[in-house]
Amino acid sequence: MNFQKKFASGEFVFLAEMNTPKGVDISEMITNARRIKDRIDGVIIPDMDNGVMRMSALGGAVLMRQQGIETIIHVYGRDRNKMAIQGDILAAHVLGIQGILVVRGEEMASGDHTDARVVDDLDEEGILRAIASLQKGIDLAGFELKGTPKFVTGCTLGPYKDDDGLERVITAAAKKVEAGAGFIVTPPVFDIDRFSILMERLKPLNIPVIPTIFLLKTVGIARYMATYEPGVFISEQTIKRIRQAPDRELECIKIAGETIHALRGIAQGVRIVTLGWEHRLPTILEYAGI
Amino acid sequence: MITAERKPLEEIIEYVRPFGKILLVGCNECVTVCSAGGRKEVGLLSSALQMAFMKEGKMLEIKEMTLERQCDPEYVEELSGHINQVDAVLSMACGCGVQEIAQRYREKPVFPAVNTKFMGASERQGVWSERCQGCGNCLLGLTGGICPVARCSKRLLNGPCGGSTKGKCEINPEIDCAWQLIWDRLKALGQEERYSDIIPAKDWRPSRDGGPRKIIREDLAS
């Protein structure tokens, strides 16, 4: 069953994020994809994740399709104007890509091509409206298309640090839903109780909510996120658990797996982000009981 | 100078329609030079608004002021004695002036009466052309004093596209081909050899692409 049908039927959806290589050696990506192919419902392919130049999401998604894996690609406005975005969206449909996740691109200054020009022709809402228009057979200039694309389109809930911030991102999310988003991906979740409260707040959006499972990897990353990303709420207890574990790497994997397990029955799926550790996805899924 | 054009009257009318008394503020700097928002234009817009509202049987009280520089907090302070007597402010300055008022008088609505256009020069009476995009890393020393970033339609840095005709741009025949101008200028300077210099791909960090910009002069900053 594909993730589109699962979304519609309310079943739990397992999505794994898989980055494209910086270069043309696709062997690692393909190997990692084959390992999880039958255990997940689809992969999400980021585009130039964290502002780092790498093979495009469209290229990566085609590789996944060749492996028989369903795909969702990231689309954002930092690097492409409204013409390029629409052109790629049409190409994505023809190449068999089923889903689009509209995201906000990382600032150019945070990436590895800091001297590049920023486009920002369309924001997230603008891209969602463009997708909605293309699906009705009309482009943004009002011209009729020859054949219309179809996607499951999602958006993200922006990061937030406090209640005020949460209000703002929920208002922004409501606008994105109104513009056509059919599911929403949240920032990383480490605290199930807090997430349950968030779920209540997101209920009025009336779309599937997909929390992000972020593999911490090290105590340093956990500490960094706890300090600089207070919105993700990593407890001291979690940091202590990793620090005191005989195998810290495995402990991080266990935490990710346990969080996925706990979210079943609360959310409508998960997006698992491993940032280069896609080879550890099978172990995470094991600990999640999948 | 920063150039601007007055917004259509209908748009301005809709901004001020909810209010009974407004402060209409011009600026004595760039918008005066380009005849968009100086003392004279403040008077003209004031009359036009009052006539438009009178036709509808509505009274709009307008207090007119023109500041020396609306982008300067020192001059914007001059509005403090008047701001509480009005419901809203209509600014005829560029976007910098409008924002300065918004920042200083946080609880008073402020609306723009002009569209800020570009940094340019006066070609002749009533005609202004774009000259600079404020890219933050000036190339004029390499291109004979003519800017390809601001004046070439395609922002080409290494010679023309080949589409120009008789020195005019293929995209807009009313615009000079920047690279024709650069070539003519290099020839006049006897520096034709510079035409074959390769200008590397531009670093856009000093431009707006690196985020909103700020200049801090440590020797002057208080």
Image: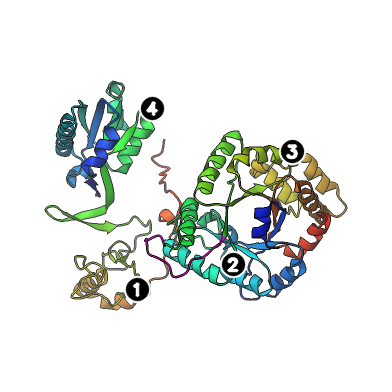
- Calculate the distance from the C-alpha at mark 2 to the C-alpha at mark 1: 39 Å
Q: Secondary structure at mark 3?
A: helix
- Calculate the distance from the C-alpha at mark 3 to the C-alpha at mark 2: 35 Å
Q: Secondary structure at mark 2?
A: loop
Q: Look at mark 1 in the image and give the residue it sits on.
A: B158
Amino acid type of the residue that numbered disc 3 sits on in the rendered structure: Asp
Residue range in magenta is A139-151
B5 sits left or right of A89 in the view: left
Q: Look at mark 4 in the image and give the residue it sits on.
A: B107
Which chain does the numbered disc 4 sit on?
B
Say whether marks 3 and 1 touch (CB < 8 Å).
Answer: no
Using the rendered image of the protein, determine whether residue A125 is visible from the camera's viewpoint. Answer: yes
Mark linked to residue A97:
2
Residue A151 in the image: x percent, y percent? 56, 61
Q: Look at mark 3 in the image and give the residue it sits on.
A: A193
Decide which of tag 3 and tag 2 comes sooner along the chain.
Answer: 2
Query: Label 3: how many residues lie within 10 Å, few (<14), some (14-19) or many (20+)?
Result: few
